[in-house]
Every structure is written in C-alpha cells, then in structure tokens.
Image (tube, rainbow, N blue to C red):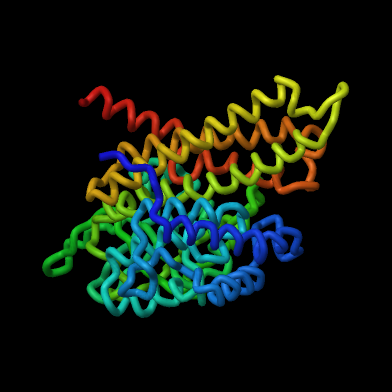
Amino acid sequence: MIDFSLPEDLAAERDRIRRFVVDKIVPYERDPRLTSHGPNDELRQELVELARAEKLLTVQAPEELGGRGLTHVEQAVVYEAAGWSTLGPVAMNCAAPDEGNMFLLSKVANPEQTDRYLMPVINGHQRSVFAMTEPGGAGSDPGQLATTATFDGENFTINGRKWLITGADGAKTWIIMAKLEANPHLDGPIPEGPTLFLAEGGTPGITIERTMNTMDRNYVGGHGVVNFENLVLPAESLLGESGQALRYAQLRLAPARLTHCMRWLGAAERAQSIAVEHAKTRTAFGKPIGEHEGVSFMLADNEIALHQCRLTIWHACWLMDQGHKARHESSMAKSYVSEELFKVADRCVQVLGGIGISDETVVEMIFRDMRAFRLYDGPTEVHKWAIGRKVLRD
C-alpha cells in the first residue's frame, strides 16, 4: 500500500519546528557572529540552548542515547522544517557534519568511545569532524587515501594532510581516516588498509593550518586545512575494525546524503516563498510581475521541482526504514535533488532581479550555499557514474 499522509503528531511537530525556526532562529541571520566562515561557536551555542529549551535538540539520536529515535521518513519531515533557515539545523544539532558523525558513532563506537566522543556531541556541548578528504585526491575516490597510520603494538602514529575538513576549527571529536600499514614484526598483525581513528581536538600532532575561503557559510567552523604530523594515538582510539573505513564511510554517507537533501529542501522552500511574495508585490509594465508568464512559469517550475524532490527523498527514506541499504536510491536522490534545488534557488534569484544578488534577502546566501551542495557527499557526476554502473550491471 502507498500512503503519503503524515500522522497528525508528526505534522504537528513539523509545524512546531517551523514556528520555532521562524520566530527564534531567523532573527539571528543578521547576527555578525554569522561570519564568512559560517556561524562561530558562540553563536552556535546560543542557538543550541534555544533548541534545548524547546526540547528540540538532537531529536534524531537513538532513544537509548537520549533522542527520539526518529525514522528516516520522520527525519525528512523534521529536517525540512528545520532547514527553513540555514541556522535551524545548527540550533537543533542536526547539521552536517555532526549529524552524520553521530549516526556513524552510534553504530560503530564501543561503550567507552560513546561516552567520551559521542555523548558530548549529542548533548550539544561539542562538535565533531570527519577527516577524510585530501589535496591529492582522496575524497570522492577514497582509494587515493595518502594519510598513513602505523602501529607499534601499543600506539598508532598518523601522518598526512587533509583539506576541506568541515568544522575542523574548534571541534573536539575527531574521526580520522588513514591507511593502516602492515607491520610484519608484530605477533598477530591487525588487518591493514583504510581505517578510522578517534582523537580529541587539540591533541599534539593535529595542526589546523588555516580555514579555507569558500563561497558557502552555513557550517560552523568553515572548512579547514589540517596537518597530522606524528599524531600518536593509543590502541583504544581505533574506531570499529581496522581496514574497514570504506565500509563505515558508506554506512555514514548513504543516510547523510539524504539528510543534506532534507535540510536544503527547507531552504529552497524559503527562497521560493520570498520569490513568490516579491512576484505578488513588485510591478512592471502595468501589473505585478507574477502575472507575466516569464515569471509565473519560473515559479511553477520551482513548485514542480520542490514536490518531486520531496517525493524522491521520502521514497529513499521509506526504503531505508524497510531495512534496505538504499545506496542506489540515495545516490539518485542526492544527484537529482542537489541539481534541482540549485535550479530552484537560481530561478528565485532571477525573479528577485537586482535584490536577488544582494543581501537584502537570504536568497543570495541560499543560492551560494546550494551551489556547494552539488559537490559534497559526492559530486553529481560521481553519483551518476555509480548509478550508470548499476544500470549496466543489472
């Protein structure tokens, strides 16, 4: 049976979240602490406390860890409402990269690691990073991983360079991907290959070179360039099993792709609402511009795209809720939704005309941030390549 209706309690919670974002969070969009590198930690903490007061903090976390244990479909509804402002997910602690990192740690971390590295993030007291992407190519193709780890029987030593590490500046929980090298001199060597490690921010050997200047500004801490120089971590810093980092990355990425889609759908809706209001009130050639087909057709195209994106997201989420990995469907959703929502934002800029490229509204910021959405968690072309391989294989 196909049922597109929302339970009354979920619809009510969606509306409550939207009111919270509109009333409490949107006013912060002009706050000077929303810098060119994203909101700073002081602003983030202030927003987090607002969500905490409304019992809206980290609602996606498993029930046993203090959250509500939302299904993927429920997350889609909640995150879309939160995404009305790019600061909404920051306040509710469901923004990237923390949301994906919390999901991964809840699946892989042992009890001691959960207490030390995960719970402070769930509770909104600290942030996390996932350090994988490298200047030499490791990113969409993690097989090019150049950061290395060696094990001497007691400690791991990590060396390498990363960049585009979202939220690196100020993060306390670090998930680091490195290629564990074989050590034939150990009795019973552990499996080699791409491996995940946990570390605390500020550990000697972790150096943040700089924060990169990028066109987007919705992530706390921006995107950093990081050096690992003889970073020594104890044996218990191993996250999960050695040599399994790529499998764990896929575990994290499939739902993370969808949560990006959910949040940006809310932002695109916001841009559309601003464009619609402008089209109703701005006049040209004797009538409101919305009555001209050139404008009304753009708004119609946006409405169609928003609807189709929502259905695409919900379908992939439904599959995951049924126990399917849905890697193919989440990949289709990421490539389709990111491209379509960027077109929505672009058309909104066009409808707004001159003010569309100014900061008179948030549309120009949504437009710039939406452009980055087409790249992270896999560029459209990489997803299409994977989709095409599956089509040919099947």
Please tell me which residue is depicted at 53% across the width and 30% down the height of the picture.
304
Please tell me which residue is depicted at 61% across the width and 70% down the height of the picture.
47
Please tell me which residue is depicted at 59% across the width and 39% down the height of the picture.
371
Q: Number of labelled discs? A: 0
Asked whether residue 187 is in view, the answer is yes
Percent x, y of residue 193: 26, 53
| Image quadrant where one finds the C terminus | top left
Q: Is residue 139 above or below residue 339?
A: below
Q: Is residue 120 above or below residue 98?
A: below
| Image quadrant where one finds the N terminus | top left
Viewer-side residue, 164 vs 379: 379
Asked whether residue 221 is in view, the answer is no
Residue sticking out furthest to the left? 188
Percent x, y of residue 216: 63, 48
Q: Quadrant of residue 279?
A: top right
Residue sticking out furthest to the right? 286
Q: Is residue 309 above or below residue 25?
A: above
Viewer-side residue, 104 vs 302: 302
Q: Quadrant of residue 33?
A: bottom right
Percent x, y of residue 69: 34, 65
Please tell me which residue is depicted at 35% across the width and 79% down the height of the picture.
115
Q: Is residue 23 left or right of residue 92?
A: right
Percent x, y of residue 392: 25, 22
